[in-house]
Image (cartoon, helix red, strand yellow):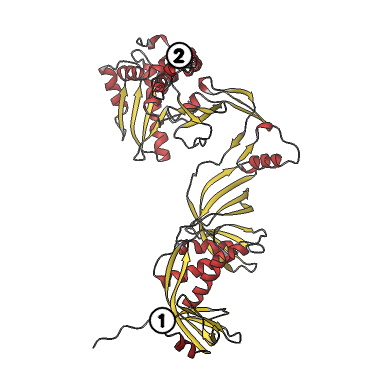
Amino acid sequence: MGRVEWTRLSGDDVEEVLAILISREHPRAERIRPSRGDGGIDILLPLDDGTFRVFQAKKFTENLTTSQKRQIKESFDRLVSYTSSRGMQVANWSLVTPLDRTKENLEWLESVTSEADFDVDWLGRPYVEGLASKYPEVIDYYLRDGKERLEAAVSSLTSLLRLHAGSSGGPSDAYQASDSIATLHVLHEEINRYDPHYRYDVAVESETTPSHQLDFPGLVCSVQQSDGKSRVTVRVIARFADAVHVRPIPLSVKIRAEKGSELETAMEDFGSFGTPITVPPENVNVSLDLPGGLGVSDSAGEFSILMPKPNSSIPLQCSILDPEGAALAETEIVFHTRTHGSAGAEVYGSEEGGVFDMKLRLVFPNQLSHINVQPQNFSGRKLESVLPGLRFLAECQSPNRLRIVDPLAGTQAALGDLGGGNTGDIAMICECVENLITLQRAAKRRIPAPDFTTVRVEDSLDWSRAARLVRGETVNITWSDIKVNVIPGHGGELGDQFPGALLLRYPLTVRVSGVDYDLGLCQFWTPAAQIRRHNGKPVIEDGKAIVEPMDGANGALRMVAPLEAPHSN
């Protein structure tokens, strides 16, 4: 690529190209559009230590005139005033021009910036030419015929992808996976040769492969085409942060919704509160001017505006109040995402124990109009961490109210009514967790929260009975029979002890999520039991006698206190 003749270009072209070159070199940089309030900043680069580097691009291509020096000094003075009034800490200010610096010009710049409390430098023609050599596609696109060649490169995709389409398919023509590597390299290099704003990555996947993730770094959009067997995805990725402003992507969407339909309601919610929305293909036409010739015009397709990425982390204390204002339950919810529209906003958060997600709809200025709570799967978490959230959910119903308080300021952020709802299942789960915490202490082992979608009623009843025993209660039960081990040859002696009272001790265990937990020694007692007999002799099966209740006598269970260790003198 030949040397750029900067002196033959208009001032606007020079400054536009300089800005793009600097942005390509520093992708995080933000270009500040010229205005009366730009503070003498053309390009602002945030640094890792919280300070900023400022680039001031000037179109001057020949030795500075008095007027040009005045413009540079005015830009510098505006920068000093602007940053000091806003508390911005500047680490470096760089003047960038496609002009060879002279000793006299450097001395002049040093004299007018001598009182600056940050570094000042002048990046002249060698720096600019170095960037032009490093990023030739910028020069080609803006100053030569790069735009046309970009369109031609994208058009060549078809021929590159059809490289082996004419193969006869015979054994000698078998196309191996390794054969495609060189073709794909050429394809990627060709489509990324001319566009200074965006990079294009291409992937070919089976139709059953899950769709790409939208949080791909720098992703602007993805275009997918399918032939029913495979899917080609072209990802358009910004080369620098300001690319979407330099080369915008206009979007036109026409949505048709019948009056009174769910889609009409969804559109109203989006306009009023920014609620995410998905429109089916039969109701939408999209025109999108994508770079690289990938755009579409008046095309049908599913259109979605998704939830924004989490943009904050604000922990707030949330309480359930009864109609008299007494607190029934409380937990902390971390609010992380916000959408907004013409009438208000929606705020999304997650309960600290992972028990539920919450969405609040706020009508401006600060009226809480709607509360939505969505339980989550918290299996595997610590039981103690999920209990506050469960108690909260169990009380989350009318006529109770929700109060939200900023724990740092101690001020009430919102207060709203709760809708009706059946929280019976949540109350049962809450009771189960309380019982499991009791059993956990007895077992001296941590019991992870089970998946309550798979817990049986029988399991919860077993945990409840075991927890009562561990707490020191006596549990009365009905029973049908008990098998008792018999010492060989002593069946008759056992038979002589019945009818009468029966006292048995056995290890008490519970099973949670397929794991057995030992809780200690349990005692069973009944006042009247009899042994099953046949022809007057005890029935012995597999070394066990069968003991049955007498006259419908119930049994009683209680835990046996562990023996204390003997004291040494």
Q: Is residue 284 above or below residue 385?
A: above
Q: In which quarter of the image is residue 112?
A: top left
Q: Is residue 461 above or below residue 513?
A: below
Q: Residue lying farthest front?
A: 535
Q: What residue type is labelled 2?
A: Gly
- Which SS class for mark 2? helix
Image coordinates for residue 51, horizontal then vertical, percent: 36, 38
- C-alpha span from label 1 to label 2: 99 Å
Q: Is residue 257 above or below residue 3?
A: below
Q: Report whether 457 appears left or right of 217.
A: right
Whether residues under marks 1 and 2 lie with C-beta atoms below 8 angstroms apart, the answer is: no
Quadrant occupied by the N terminus: top left
Q: What residue type is labelled 1?
A: Pro
The circle on residue 146 is 2
Q: Residue lying farthest left?
A: 569
Residue 246 in sight from this viewpoint: yes
Q: Is residue 431 above or below residue 408?
A: below
Q: How crowded is mark 2: few (under 14 residues within 10 Å), some or many (20 or more)?
A: many
Pick the front one: 330 or 34: 330
Image coordinates for residue 24, horizontal then vertical, percent: 39, 25
Pick the front one: 110 or 16: 16
Q: How crowded is mark 1: few (under 14 residues within 10 Å), some or many (20 or more)?
A: few
The residue drawn where x is 59% and y is 47% is: 346
Q: Report whether 28 appears left or right of 525.
A: left
Q: Can you tell which of label 1 and label 2 is closer to the viewer?
A: 1
Q: Residue lying farthest right?
A: 259
Image coordinates for residue 180, horizontal then vertical, percent: 41, 22
For disc 1, the marked residue is 488
